[in-house]
Image: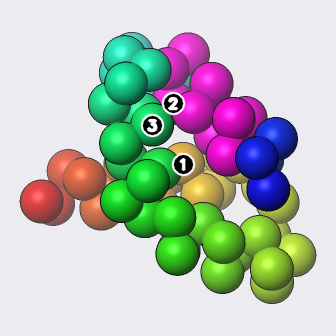
Amino acid sequence: MLHFTTKIAEYIVKYYNINRIEADMMIEDEYDYIEEEFNRGNEDVKTIVKELISIYMVA
């Protein structure tokens, strides 16, 4: 799971121009969602990041 969340953070930083600290905070805040998707077998980083970004754009 640690490797998976690292890949998510790297994707956020690279494609959404958000600094690493903010990306880590997003992941920490939504860890339950990420863990649930990971356990379902959804390991598509791009899809999960899109959901995280949409959550944070609404907030």
Label 3: how many Cα within 10 Å (few below 14, some 14–19, many 20+): some
The residue pinned by badge 1 equals 49
The mark that comes first in sequence, 2 or 1, is: 2
Amino acid carrying label 2: it is Ile
* SS class, disc 3: helix
Would residue 46 be found to the left or right of residue 3 on screen? left
Q: Nearer the viewer, mark 2 or mark 3?
A: 3
Marks 2 and 1, Cα distance to the nearest angstrom?
7 Å
The residue pinned by badge 3 equals 24
**CB within 8 Å, label 2 to label 1:** yes
Label 1: how many Cα within 10 Å (few below 14, some 14–19, many 20+): many
Residue 17 at x, y = what percent? 39, 16
Residue 53 at x, y = what percent? 37, 48
**Magenta segment:** 5-14
Residue in view at x 77 percent, y 70 percent: 38
Residue in view at x 53 percent, y 74 percent: 33
Amino acid carrying label 1: it is Val
Give the vertical position of 29 relative to 57 (above or below): below
Residue in view at x 36 percent, y 42 percent: 25
Give the vertical position of 9 relative to 29 (above or below): above
Q: Nearer the viewer, mark 3 or mark 1?
A: 3
Give the vertical position of 39 relative to 42 (above or below): below
The mark that comes first in sequence, 3 or 1, is: 3
Marks 2 and 3, Cα distance to the nearest angstrom?
9 Å
Would residue 52 be found to the left or right of residue 11 on screen? left
Q: Residue furthest right?
A: 41
